[in-house]
Every structure is written in C-alpha cells, then in structure tokens.
Image: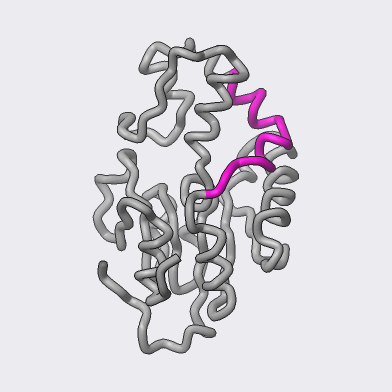
C-alpha cells in the first residue's frame, strides 16, 4: 500500500470524507430495506453489479422492479428520517475517524442537498451525532460538488466527485468507478487501508 502521509505536520492536514458507501453501507442498506419493506425477497444483493451507483436503475435493468416501482421505493425510503438515521457503518470507519480527528482536521462531506426532502438532512444529522460524538456539527458539510472543496485529501467512492479536487484523491473501489485511474485506490477492507495510508496502527 502506497503511503503519502509522513513528514507533514499532521495538524495542518485537512481530510474530507464522503459518507455514503465510504463510511456507511448505504447501497447494501438501501437494498435490504427494499427487500424487507417492499416484499422483494427474490432480489440478491451483489457488489459486482454493473457500473452504476444508483440502485433504482439497477433494479430496473435486472427486472426486480418497474421504473415507477423503483422510483416509489426510493421516494418512500428517502422521506424516512429513521432510515437515514440508522444506516450502518463500514467496519473500522468510526474508530479510524476518531483516531484521525485527534491529529488532523476532519470533515464529513455529504451530498444530500439535491434531494427534495428534509428527511435526509435531519436523519443524517442524528446519525452523525449518534455515531461521531467526538466531532462537532461544523465538521459535517452538506455539499453537492465536492471537487470545490479545498484541502489535502478527499476520500470518495464516486469518481465524478473527485475529478476536480486539487488535493490527493482516495477512491474506495467499486465496480462503478473502475474506469477512473488518477487516484489512490483502496481495496478489500477499506478502513484498515485508510489507516495504512496515514501510517496508523491496525484496528
């Protein structure tokens, strides 16, 4: 694993971290909610789905729902504050972010402002306060264009969000972003690899 953090004073480093599919199991949780809440028990979740991070499109392409059904499922879930509040974390995310926050400036950056509902922002605030009590609310940004952020690192899963970012770009590996090469790419257990990049010990 290539390491880029060594000599620079850690306290001067600013790290932006995306939330969905980087800190949280967003796609998996959305899928499982659709299975249970909308009786789609024949669906099988797979990380090898085609190059698309919008699961509603994936449902339609694979014959699990019509376009109208997929849109309706998304609308119901996206308007549920409790849904947003309860999205589970990826293994190691919380502890790694807590450790990084002791030494660097950490900001969680989430793209929810394009959704026409207050539920995601309310739910995400509650999710943030419950899972990251060691962070302040000013360390949670709502932003749709993360490439406009100014800092040292941006950790993301959507390649379009990191293309214009001037700092070092870290991309969690998913089928939908494998065409993008100009980044540090993380495989397998993700957050243990983040610890390696910043020369932190194992979980």
Query: Is residue 85 found inside the magenta-colored segment of the image?
Result: yes
Q: Residue at x 30, y 74 (%)?
A: 3
The location of residue 78, given as percent across then percent down, is 65, 31
> Is residue 78 rendered magenta in the image?
yes
Vertical position of residue 42 compared to residue 77: above or below? above
| Magenta residues, dominant SS class | helix
- Residue 104 x %, y %: 54, 78
Against 186, residue 99 (above or below) is below
Relative placement, left or right, of 6 versus 14 is left
At x 58% / y 44%, what residue is drawn? 88
Task: Report the quarter where the C terminus lies.
Answer: bottom left
Q: Position of residue 189 (x, y in %)?
A: 37, 53
In the picture shown, does residue 44 fall above or below 63?
below
| Magenta-colored span | 72-89
Residue depicted at 41% across the width and 27% down the height: 45
- Is 87 placed left or right of 49 in the picture? right
Residue at x 63%, y 37% (from the top left corner): 115
Occupied quadrant, residue 140: bottom right
* Quarter placement of the N terminus: bottom left
């Amino acid at each position: 694993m290539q390491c880029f953090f060594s000599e620079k004073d850690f306290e001067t480093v600013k790290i932006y971290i995306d939330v969905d599919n980087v800190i949280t199991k967003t796609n998996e949780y959305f899928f499982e909610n659709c299975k249970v809440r909308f009786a789609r028990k024949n669906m099988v979740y797979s990380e090898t789905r085609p190059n698309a991070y919008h699961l509603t499109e994936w449902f339609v392409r694979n014959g699990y729902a019509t376009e109208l059904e997929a849109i309706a499922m998304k609308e119901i879930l996206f308007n549920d504050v409790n849904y947003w509040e309860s999205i589970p974390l990826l293994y190691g995310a919380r502890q790694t972010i807590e450790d990084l926050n002791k030494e660097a400036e950490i900001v969680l950056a989430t793209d929810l402002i394009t959704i026409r509902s207050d539920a995601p922002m309310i739910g995400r605030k509650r999710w943030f306060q419950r899972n990251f009590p060691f962070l302040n609310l000013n360390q949670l940004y709502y932003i749709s264009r993360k490439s406009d952020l100014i800092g040292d690192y941006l950790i993301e899963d959507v390649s379009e969000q990191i293309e214009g970012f001037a700092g070092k770009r870290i991309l969690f590996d998913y089928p939908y972003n494998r065409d993008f090469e100009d980044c540090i790419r993380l495989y397998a257990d993700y957050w243990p690899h983040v610890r390696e990049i910043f020369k932190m010990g194992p979980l």
